[in-house]
Amino acid sequence: MGTRQMRVEILLFIFTILGSISFGNAASAHIHSHQHKQSSNERTEDGAFSPRDMDHYAGGEHHQEFDHEAILGSVKEAEEFDKLPTKESKRRLAILLTKMDLNSDKFIERNELKAWILRSFSMLSAEESQDRLEDADTDEDGKVSWNEIIQDTYGTDPEDLAVDDKLITDDKQTFQAADINKDGYLDTEEFKAYTHPEETPRMFPLLLKQALDDKDTNKDGSISFQEFIGNRAKAEDKEWLLIEKEKFDYEHDKNGDGRLDSDEILSWLVPSNEEIASDEVDHLFAASDDDHDNRLSFDEILDHHDAFVGSEATDYGDHLQDIERFTDEL
């Protein structure tokens, strides 16, 4: 077999495999990357709620899934865009831009993009909450009882329930606070308050109470550095301790009095979606404001559509580059 024929047969084989990946499994690869992300109400090691952008950059690697969800306001929509040809992805993005453009001047200003992203964050939380409600709602009556939450979250094994006693107590308090009409069930809006208390201001007093119950050992209504690190210090080294002390002094203790008061505790516990949205605006502008006029034309956004939304071609182009490199080496 000649070299040229061998290369052709290898290319045909690769494209056969690539076809199944790019047009069948590329979407599922994207779906996996969307679904692996934690929902925003999980907790960090020190007990604070994880910020929504916790997976935007991980291990020095940029994950575009966050950008796409911040524009589309839906994990499911982002997954759908991942399957679209580039032309259709741009067409749909152009429609979104007309909705994002509040003053109809064919440009997206920073404040317009930030408002849109904040709207998307709220929609993402609603979607996450609705998905979990449907999982927990075993009798399919559109609302969730405490027993349904127990079974969905912890199961029915008595040993598991005993191990998770503190978590269950906190969850029960959260359920009761979310149940604003006190009927023993959570409807869609109440369930969102239960699953995302960090995004529901009426739940903040409970979050503050739970934090003080957990950490305020001397019951003075504030949290000192020693109380803040608690038992975590026993398993860590001096370098960790110095890093935590610096974070406590310069990030959390805003008035510098050596302890966290109520406002500072909430500031530590509850991520600021405003700040996250502002950072995302900066990121998207840096990626697409080609003429540096501090506003984005529709054309600039569509030229950089892959920064805003996904499409099938994104991964496909990567595969083509891999093939070109491979064949050059033959």
Image (tube, helix red, strand yellow):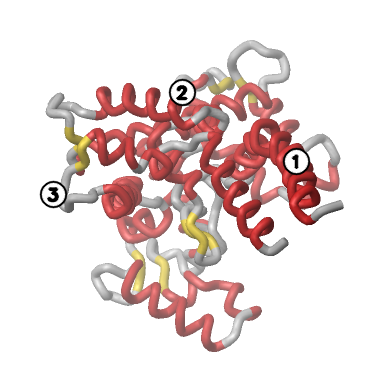
Residue 129 visible in the picture: no
Residue at the image position 50 percent from the left and 44 percent from the top: 65
**Amino acid at circle 2:** Glu
Find residue 293 and report its horizontal and vertical position in percent.
13, 49
Q: Which residue is mark 2?
A: 189
125 or 236: nearer the viewer: 125
Dot 1 or dot 2: first in sequence order is: 1
Q: Which residue is mark 1?
A: 12
Dot 3 or dot 1: first in sequence order is: 1
Q: CB of mark 1 within 8 Å of CB of mark 2?
A: no
**Amino acid at circle 3:** Asp
Residue at the image position 15 percent from the left and 24 percent from the top: 104
Find residue 302 and report its horizontal and vertical position in percent.
32, 36
Find residue 326 and report its horizontal and vertical position in percent.
68, 58
Secondary structure beneath label 3: loop
Label 2 vs label 3: CA separation?
Answer: 41 Å
* Direction from residue 281 to residue 49 in the image, left or right: right
Is the residue 220 above or below the residue 196 in the image?
Answer: below
| Numbered label attached to residue 212 | none
Query: How many residues crowd around disc 2 within 10 Å: few (fewer than 14), some, or many (20 or more)?
Result: some
Secondary structure beneath label 2: helix
Residue at the image position 42 percent from the left and 79 percent from the top: 245
Residue at the image position 58 percent from the left and 20 percent from the top: 185
Find residue 225 and report its horizontal and vertical position in percent.
43, 75
Label 1 vs label 2: CA separation?
Answer: 53 Å
